[in-house]
Amino acid sequence: MDGVLCDSFREAAERLGLIEADNTLDESLTESTQFAMPASLRRLFATILVFCEPGDVRGLWDRHLEAMSNDYRRSHTCSKAVEQMVLLDIRGMLQSMGKDIALFPLPDIDETYDTTGGEAREVTEESTIEVDAHDTPLASLLNHEQRLAYDEILAAVDAGDGGVFFVDGPGGTGKTFLYRALLAKVRGEGKIAVATATSGVAASIMPGGRTAHSRFKIPLSIEDGASCSFTKQSGTDKLLRMASFILWDEASMTKRQAVEALDNSMRDIMGRRHQPFGGKTVVFGGDFRQVLPVVRKGSRGQIIDATLRSSYPWKGMRQLRLLTNMRAHNDPWYADYLLRVGNGTEETDEEGHIRLPQDICVPPTGDGVDLEKLIEHVFPALDHNMSDPNYMTSRAILSTKNDNVDKINTRMIERFQGEEKIYHSFDSAEDDPHGYYAPEFLNNLTPNGLPPHALKLKINCPVILLRNIDPANGLCNDTRLVVRGFQRNAIDAEIVLGQHAGRRVFLPRIPLCPSDDDIFPFKFKRKQFLLGSDLP
């Protein structure tokens, strides 16, 4: 393999990535040392501790401490000081991933080397968010509807007595524009504003944005009456008690139980059991004409019952409506058309289909190359632009069916230049001691939310992250990245959207299970890079 004569078939299979080697995690750090800066290696080490179930943590530490500390060694000659600085940095990274360094068998930390002052990491992160110079003048550019909402929300923030709002507006009416103006104003006054969204994509375009689930520690499986999973006196508790303004975009997409869990927790930590969200100013936003909460095999009634509109906090929310479509301001017919589609009043045929305007369609030819023409229309001159992250992230092909997504992915990957790299997952049935489920059978399973068994990638192809890894540093669910390099046991990628755009990260294979644990008669576990194609 690669010019090396292997001693056994197993060694050859390990080198091909077809079966898991015992030293996979060790090699992922060793391989990344050739390309990564020490800070990136420390983050990879922290990621391995939290997500990869390493068996020999102290051995990994001892073997890779030198590579992880090269930047500190340039300015410090004392080996203990260097080790402590690495430990403190890794402690902060572990905290941002929701873990305590005390859980791992690493050297003890000497707190005399800690110069952070003991402030909770969550509070430090939020209070040090810089207001973008482009966001400061946004308030002066608001239209009449946005201005009314802006003034009413800020009045509640200034009064300090709380208030719960819902900004309702179809796509293109400037909800994000309003949010950025509010965040800039509140943070510009030295107050803490917590910005979240249901999806990682929406969170990434807001300064300091995080997914609501990661910020509020909302359980993935949640029932009526639940609370968030953060504890009193934790960093999240301190942050939310200090916050003057809490924002949750795309709340129309989340299940009502998640919002109710935040309400329960806020009432508890603020000691105000009879005030919605503990007396905080909380702004939700979204558009119920778009995607609603996903209810597995749910009926129309069950989906409606899962929405925020069916939740008890909804009745107390002040409705702030944005109606003017700023994105289609110069095309009022199209703006009205979108509104009719969203409201369900557009004319349909017998099967419920609507007719799309001809000028936004790629005409079908029926000659077998329609998909190629669509790809060329959306990604013109791909050969000359594939290394440009702005080009790749400013366009996408959407599909409602996974089969179509897979077909488009295959065609798109073929168009990228360079060698294709295929990473195979390591699959297992955790509660199958007799080996009833063959690896070939497990390899053919792709539960919703998990990466495929055979992950096909090329340099410069866009991908999305499938799980929250380190939200505080841009690695949250749906983060958009571009592949920049391959190793056998690590992938070099660049974040290309949002406040962390340009940051290079190194990702290891991570073991994970389906979020729905009852879809198979066994516990399915897949170890794979948490990436999916971001082409369609």
Image (cartoon, rainbow, N blue to C red):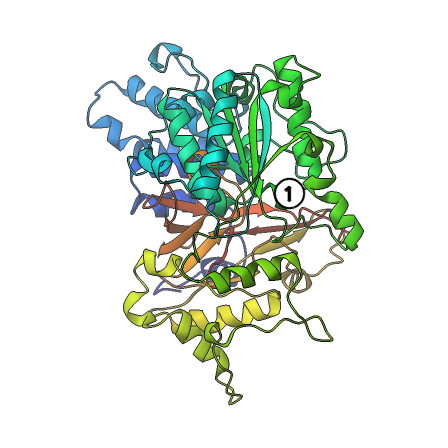
Seen from the viewer's position, the closer of residues 129 and 93 is 129
Horizontal relation, residue 242 to residue 4: left or right? right
Q: Position of residue 460 (x, y in %)?
A: 35, 60
Note whether 536 is above or below 152 in the view shown. Answer: below
Position of residue 40 relative to residue 201, above or below, is above
Residue 415, position in %: x, y? Answer: 39, 73
The residue beneath circle 1 is 254
The foreground one among 160 and 278 is: 160
Check the image and report above or below for 437 versus 206. Answer: below
Q: Is residue 311 left or right of residue 233?
A: right
Q: Is residue 3 above or below residue 491?
A: below
Residue found at the far front of this picture: 144
Q: Position of residue 212 (x, y in %)?
A: 56, 36
Corner quadrant of residue 204: top left
Q: Residue at x 40, y 65 (%)?
A: 1
Looking at the picture, which amino acid does disc 1 mark? Answer: Thr
